[in-house]
Amino acid sequence: MLLEFSCSNFKSIKNKVEFSAIATDDDENEDCLKHFDDFRVLHTAVIYGPNGAGKSNLFKAIGFMKNLVVNSCKNGEGQLLEQPRHKMSADDERSEFNMQFIMGDVRYAYGFVLVDNLVSEEYLYYFCDGKQVVYGEGQTMYDNEQIPVFEREGNEVWLGNLYEENEVLRIIIDEKLMRNKLLLSCMGDNTGITHITQAFLFFKLHIVVHDIEMEANRYDCIKVIQENEEMRQFIVATLRELNNDIRDIRVEYPKVKVVYDEFETDLFDEESTGINKLFYLVLPIVDSFINSKVMIVDEIEVSLHRIVAYKIIKLFNEYSSDRYAQLIFTSHDTSLLNSKLFRKDQIWFAQLGNDRVTDLYSLAEIKNVHKNENIAKGYIMGKYGAIPVFDKNSCKGDVTNDI
């Protein structure tokens, strides 16, 4: 699960912004939280704000971080990294990316700094999950204390006491590391060291930045339905939960048939855009449940009826309390802004200041928001900032009353 993410000097984000999936002390909707050590973690979170405020850029920053971890090890000598700075930043201004996350029941902290399109700093820590562990000669670490795996400045690396004699790591540092590569990327999942492997695989496999405008996962869906009966049944059950008329999915490769009570249709040639979008969303949803992934979706309601979007959110809120699955998304649909669906700490806003800089904050940070307040109305009236641009019909009635 993603616990916290922060970044600075990335596209419209100039000053450091911080997103947190760690719940506040609020005891509302306690059942939809995942308990981990001393934390209560949110399964869902939504970000609202007008077009151009930087909502999508936050997700692009997470995708950018993931891409560098997974792929920067392939960079050749002399190749510069991409560094999408804020337009008002100096060429030599640093861009910083930090993330805390849970992987394999361990909490990690990882981050790096880019300067002049090269890696300036990088670090990886994990937090001790035992009451007392031996840490190096004559040292003891206690529960929740931070244990360094490595710290880096430029090409100079300091390994933590548990790893400083490891020959494999030293060879990687000496033979593979360059300023245009992240050390975690170079180490990957080839070191045999659990904490390094788990941290790398979190970025490679467990963060899914999902673009619902893309159809690239069409054949992934077909392959999964063909080869994994448990997944197929789960996909069908999820589709039926989201659309009561659908009875089954049948594959006649490369075609997919959607089965209804009295007829069936070809998914790709005969079904609506909405059903196709739903199909593309369902696989990552199911995959998130089964394999404990963080699903990040920009504008979840695009081409989906708002009731379907509502049900997707409910799936994560209600059926994930015993799982690590997360859904973090942006939306313009104010009908979803509902205190029955979200806690205050699950609702976030992005706004662009007069200086063209993105600011990010949660509803929980705003004072005098009452327990039973009409959040959608307050948002539209500008009470929380991040003034929306919305369809005049988008807030007729409460979505919970329509279902």
Image: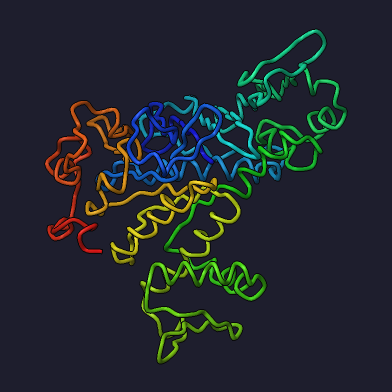
Instruction: Classify residue 72 as left or right of residue 97.
Output: right
Quadrant holding the C terminus: bottom left
157 sits to left or right of 322: right
Question: Who's the residue at 35% across and 33% down the image?
Answer: 27
In the figure, 373 relative to 155: above or below? below
| Image height of 208 relative to 343, above or below | below
Left/right of residue 396 with respect to residue 231 in the rendered view: left
Image coords of residue 151 (percent x, y): 67, 21
Q: Position of residue 137 (x, y in %)?
A: 82, 11
Does 22 sit left or right of 184 as displayed?
A: left
Which residue shows up at 38% across the image and 54% down it?
313
Q: Residue drawn at (70%, 33%), measured in percent from left and top?
A: 183
Between residue 121 and residue 403, name the one nearer to us: 403
Extreme residue in the bottom direction: 262
Looking at the picture, tell me which residue is in the foreground, 251 or 32. Answer: 32
Counting from the top left corner in percent of width and height, residue 232 is at 58, 71
Q: Residue furthest top?
A: 138
Find residue 351 and report its image quarter.
top left
80 vs 212, nearest the viewer? 212
Instruction: Find residue 114 and report its horizontal and vertical position in percent.
Output: 55, 29
